[in-house]
Amino acid sequence: MESAARRSGGGLLEGLYRVIMRRNSVYVTFIVAGAFLGERAVDYGVHKLWEYNNVGKRYEDIPVLGQRQSEE
């Protein structure tokens, strides 16, 4: 059974490892793209969490701020 798995090329992770690690340029591109996408995901998540926790306390949520009474 074990020899059949070896003949078939291994598992999904092993195949992914071979594709990404075959060339240095692919590996570096994978790391840079992963860091960029990870940073965007964390930034978006933290922003949404901050907005959720501060509903009604933000400047935009207070209707009387930023409005001047007309002097007629």
Image (tube, rainbow, N blue to C red):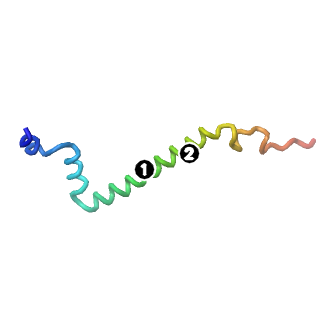
Q: What percent of the width, then of the height, locates residue 26?
A: 28, 57
The kind of secondary structure element at disc 2 is helix
> Residue at (64%, 40%) from the top-left corner?
54
Please rate how many residues cluster around mark 2, counting C-alpha atoms within 10 Å: few if below 14, some from 14 to 19, many from 20. Answer: few
- For the C terminus, the quadrant is top right
Task: Read off the residue under disc 2.
Answer: 47
Question: Residue 4 sits in which quadrant?
Answer: top left
- Specify whether 40 is left or right of 17: right
Q: Are marks 2 and 1 in contact (CB under 8 Å)?
A: no
Q: What percent of the width, then of the height, locates residue 20?
A: 25, 54
Q: What percent of the width, then of the height, locates residue 16?
A: 23, 48
Question: Residue 68 sits in which quadrant?
Answer: top right
> Residue at (51%, 49%) from the top-left corner?
43
Q: Between residue 1 and residue 25, name the one nearer to us.
A: 1
Q: Between residue 50 and residue 71, name the one nearer to us.
A: 50
The kind of secondary structure element at disc 1 is helix
- Work out which residue is located at the far right of the displayed protein and give it: 72
Q: Which mark is residue 38?
A: 1
Q: Between residue 38 and residue 3, name the one nearer to us.
A: 3
Q: Earlier in the sequence, mark 2 or mark 1?
A: 1
Q: What percent of the width, then of the height, locates residue 30?
A: 32, 55
- Specify whether 53 is left or right of 69: left
- For the N terminus, the quadrant is top left
Location of residue 53 with respect to 16 vertically, above or below: above
Location of residue 23 with respect to 37 vertically, above or below: below
> Residue at (33%, 58%) from the top-left corner?
29
